Each structure stands twice: as structure tokens, then as C-alpha cells.
Image (tube, rainbow, N blue to C red):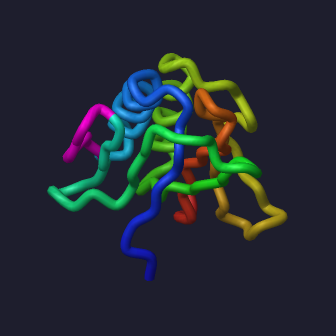
Amino acid sequence: MIDHTGINVSNFERSKEFYTHSLASLGYQLLHEFDDSGAGFGIDGQPDFWIFQGDVNTPRIHIAFHAETRAVVQAFYEAALQAGGQDNGAPGLRTHYHPNYYGAFVLDPDGHNIEAVCHTPA
């Protein structure tokens, strides 16, 4: 099991706002911030996703966040677009992965492919 992960971002403040807004639909909160160059997001006081000011990862990263329901996937997608993300795959079934794979994909301000996915049947 992965305990936490992190990515580098080109504009810390812009990315912090993007992730604060878009991950809220998944229950995530901004939990830790230090030196205006790093921030940890998570649920129940445990940060498991970090952003850091720095040279952006190349190639760009794909990160999929678990969503409890398909409605949460939709909420994530809408929030991420409102926060400045770019559409990279509207909410829907991706049956080539498995019959109940319901996901949505958004590119963050640096082009990282951020996904919310629900594996539960409708």
C-alpha cells in the first residue's frame, strides 16, 4: 500500500488553490503547509498527497484518487474545471479497465493527469 506521494509544480500558489478546491469533493483538506513551497493534502489529518514548488516532473504524472460514488467523481470533475483544470476525459464508464470503472480525468495547471475513480456498480 502506498503511504503518500508528491509532485513538483511550477507555481505553488496556483497549484495549491487548484488542489484545495478540486480535492475537497473527495473529502481532502489542505493539512500542512511550509515555507510557501510545500503542501500536504489528506483526509482525517493524514496527508497522503503533497505538492512542492520545483521543476515540474517530466513526463507528467498520472494520479488517481478514490471516489466513494459516481456522484463524487462528477463533483470532482466539475470542481477541478472550475479551479482551472483542463478536461482530459469527462466522467463515464471505462469498461476497457473493468465493467464498473467510472472515472474522470483533468489536467492540473502543469499538465499532470489527475483522476477521480469509483469502482462500485451504479
How many discs mark residues in the rendered view?
0
Please name whichever residue, 108 or 52, is drawn nearer the observer in this view of the structure: 52
Residue 9 appears at what percent x and percent y? 53, 37
Identify the residue at image location x=72%, y=51%. 93
Please name whichever residue, 10 or 95, is drawn nearer the observer in this view of the structure: 10
In the figure, is residue 94 to the left or right of 45? Answer: right
Identify the residue at image location x=64%, y=35%. 106
Identify the residue at image location x=45%, y=54%. 67
**In the image, is residue 33 part of the stretch drawn in magenta?**
yes
The range drawn in magenta is 28-36
In the figure, is residue 67 to the left or right of 3? Answer: right
**In the image, is residue 88 part of the stretch drawn in magenta?**
no
In the figure, is residue 71 to the left or right of 40? Answer: right
Magenta region, main secondary structure = strand
Q: Quadrant of the N terminus?
A: bottom left
Residue 83 appears at what percent x and percent y? 48, 20
Please name whichever residue, 9 or 19, is drawn nearer the observer in this view of the structure: 9
Residue 57 appears at what percent x and percent y? 65, 49
Q: Quadrant of the C terminus?
A: bottom right
